[in-house]
Image (spheres, helix red, strand yellow):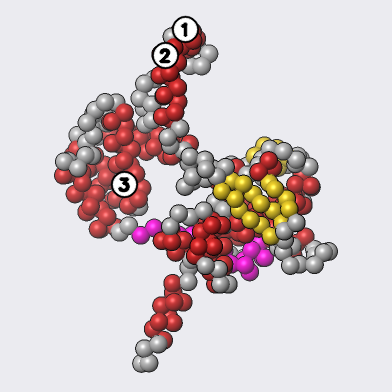
């Protein structure tokens, strides 16, 4: 069962679908109701919809294992499921989202949620899980400028090296998410004398599409700097677009074995190539799990802060909505604690 659409939809090419389409054309109210349904689907991002659907499938599968009803589910069924997830080592944030999904599906079906506050068993089970396993989320290790340089120098291939270099530098210099890198289009690029302005029409924390602009400046490296050492994000991106002959559409693309430029990269593919780049740069296998695409975003915030940028300036570049969120990325807390401890005079 789809967590976000409990009413089965006919196949697109079936006679039933055709009948539904004709009925909608003839009935103005049907068209309005369909539009309302479409807008409701847009209330959540595609990534969130996929996550909820996967959560619901997992809950259904677990219920079938013990011959329990997934819908309507009893509070004790949900509480047992949450406890089972905790026993599997799932993080508190993941378990909480599963509970949200179960509640959402029941409400969409017009049924009372087994997770409502009056259902003390579910609520107290979740509280106990949070206290037992903790709620701290382990962020990705920030990428240092030295690591970025090494990753660029160890890039492999011709087209792929040019693309990966641009992704690393644009992601790091802009503090961008992998989804923002994947969605970037040539139409969103504004080249200017100082460098480049990128308009991001939508992002994870901007689902209503207000958009924001990210600035990229020319680097201080002199002309003629070897590509393997080029750390200027503007020149690196221009080099990739020229080499790949890309003038419109997605900026970052897949590359075939025959060195043909294909369609846009998915955000997961961008995460994988960034991790591979760090591996080639010398990050050991054990340490590599601590790095990912978010390392570029965390690395930008950490490096900018260390070089004197204010929290407000960092927020305007990264699009964070609060100082608290920025501070999760600025990984200088340990240095601050050491400095404070050194002032005791012991």
The local crowd at label 2, few if under 14, some if 14 to 19, many if 20 or more residues have their Cα within 10 Å, is some
Q: Which mark is residue 30?
A: 2
Which residue is denoted by mark 1 in the rendering?
Answer: 26
Question: Marks 2 and 1, how far apart in space?
Answer: 8 Å
Q: Residue furthest bottom?
A: 346
Above or below 265: residue 234? below
What whole-number distance in Å separates the C-alpha atoms at marks 3 and 1?
44 Å
Q: Is residue 78 visible?
A: yes
Mark 2 falls on what kind of element? helix
- Mark 3 or mark 1, which has the lower sequence index? 1
Q: Is residue 37 left or right of residue 253?
A: left
Q: What x and y, as percent, mark residue 135?
A: 32, 57
Q: Are marks 3 and 1 in contact (CB under 8 Å)?
A: no
What range is drawn magenta here?
A: 136-151
Q: Are marks 2 and 1 in contact (CB under 8 Å)?
A: yes
Q: According to the image, label 3 marks what residue?
A: 96
């Amino acid at each position: 069962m789809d967590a976000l659409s409990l009413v089965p939809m006919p196949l697109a090419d079936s006679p039933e679908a055709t009948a539904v389409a004709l009925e909608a054309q003839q009935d103005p109210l049907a068209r309005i109701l369909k539009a309302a349904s479409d807008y409701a689907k847009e209330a959540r991002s595609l990534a969130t919809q996929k996550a909820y659907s996967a959560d619901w499938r997992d809950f259904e599968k677990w219920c079938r294992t013990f011959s329990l009803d997934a819908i309507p589910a009893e509070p004790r069924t949900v509480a047992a499921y949450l406890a089972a997830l905790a026993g599997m080592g799932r993080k508190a944030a993941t378990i909480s989202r599963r509970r949200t999904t179960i509640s959402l599906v029941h409400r969409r079906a017009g049924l009372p949620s087994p997770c409502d506050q009056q259902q003390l068993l579910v609520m107290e089970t979740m509280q106990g899980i949070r206290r037992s396993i903790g709620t701290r989320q382990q962020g990705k290790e920030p990428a240092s400028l030295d690591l970025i340089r090494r990753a660029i120098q160890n890039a492999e291939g011709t087209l792929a090296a040019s693309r990966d270099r641009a992704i690393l530098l644009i992601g790091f210099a802009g503090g961008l998410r992998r989804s923002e890198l994947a969605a970037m289009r040539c139409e969103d690029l504004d080249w200017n004398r100082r460098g480049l302005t990128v308009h991001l029409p939508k992002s994870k924390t901007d689902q209503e599409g207000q958009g924001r602009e990210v600035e990229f400046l020319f680097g201080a490296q002199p002309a003629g700097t070897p590509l393997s050492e080029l750390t200027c994000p503007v020149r690196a991106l221009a080099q990739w677009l020229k080499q790949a002959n890309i003038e419109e559409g997605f900026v970052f693309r897949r590359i075939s074995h025959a060195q043909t430029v294909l369609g846009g990269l998915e955000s997961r593919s961008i995460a994988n190539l960034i991790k591979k780049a760090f591996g080639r740069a010398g990050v050991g296998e054990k340490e590599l799990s601590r790095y990912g695409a978010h390392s570029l975003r965390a690395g930008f915030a950490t490096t900018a802060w260390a070089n004197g940028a204010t929290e407000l300036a960092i927020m305007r570049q990264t699009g964070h909505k609060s100082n608290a969120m920025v501070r999760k990325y600025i990984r200088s807390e340990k240095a601050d604690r050491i400095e404070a401890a050194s002032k005791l005079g012991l």
